[in-house]
Image (cartoon, rainbow, N blue to C red):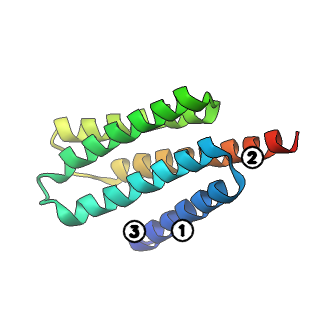
Amino acid sequence: MSPVLSIVVLWLVLLAVVLFALTKGGMAERYGSLAILTGGVLAWAVHGLFPSGGVPTALLALDGILAVALLFLAMRYGRAWLGAAMLLQGIQFSLHAYYFVGEREHDLTYSLVNNLVTIAILVAIIVGTFGAMRRRVA
């Protein structure tokens, strides 16, 4: 799969998961999915707005802010999926920190880990949304 196609597919999946959480989830799922979507949009914007030297620092800051937002939501709503998403975001933060401190270029390993963590966060949102649907029925 070409890199451009994989990016388009990942964005479509992200939008579908956010839409699912917004329509079927509770408040925690709505806020969590919107936080993830906002983080994704801002990360995309960073690549276009910042000079290449400032991108790693900005991405690191965005990951930290998103992790804090997920921590706040996890403390507020006490949902296990939010805790999992927060831990996964910590992995994302560590990935960016490793490449930033090591002054390494983004390679296949970076892309693979970055995408797998993103997919795992989306799975956590889906699990949380199904949980909210079950709680509403019960």
Most foreground residue, 65 or 109: 65
Marks 1 and 2: which is nearer the front? 2
> Marks 3 and 1, Cα distance to the nearest angstrom?
14 Å
Most foreground residue, 95 or 72: 72
Is residue 105 among the parts visible in the rendering?
yes
Quadrant, the C terminus: top right
Side of 58 relative to 74 (left or right): left
Q: Is residue 89 above or below residue 1?
A: above
Tell me the tag on residue 33.
Answer: none
Tell me the tag on residue 3.
Answer: 3
* Residue at 17% across, 35% down: 101
Query: Residue 15 at what x, y percent from top left?
Result: 54, 64
- Earlier in the chain: of badge 2 and badge 3, it is 3
* Residue at 68% across, 59% down: 23
Tell me the tag on residue 130.
Answer: 2
**Secondary structure of residue under mark 3:** helix
> Marks 2 and 3, Cα distance to the nearest angstrom?
31 Å
Side of 100 relative to 25 (left or right): left
Q: Which residue is mark 1?
A: 12
Type of amino acid at the residue the image marks with label 1: Leu
**Secondary structure of residue under mark 1:** helix
Label 1–label 2 contact, CB within 8 A: no
Query: Residue 98 at what x, y percent from top left?
Result: 26, 35
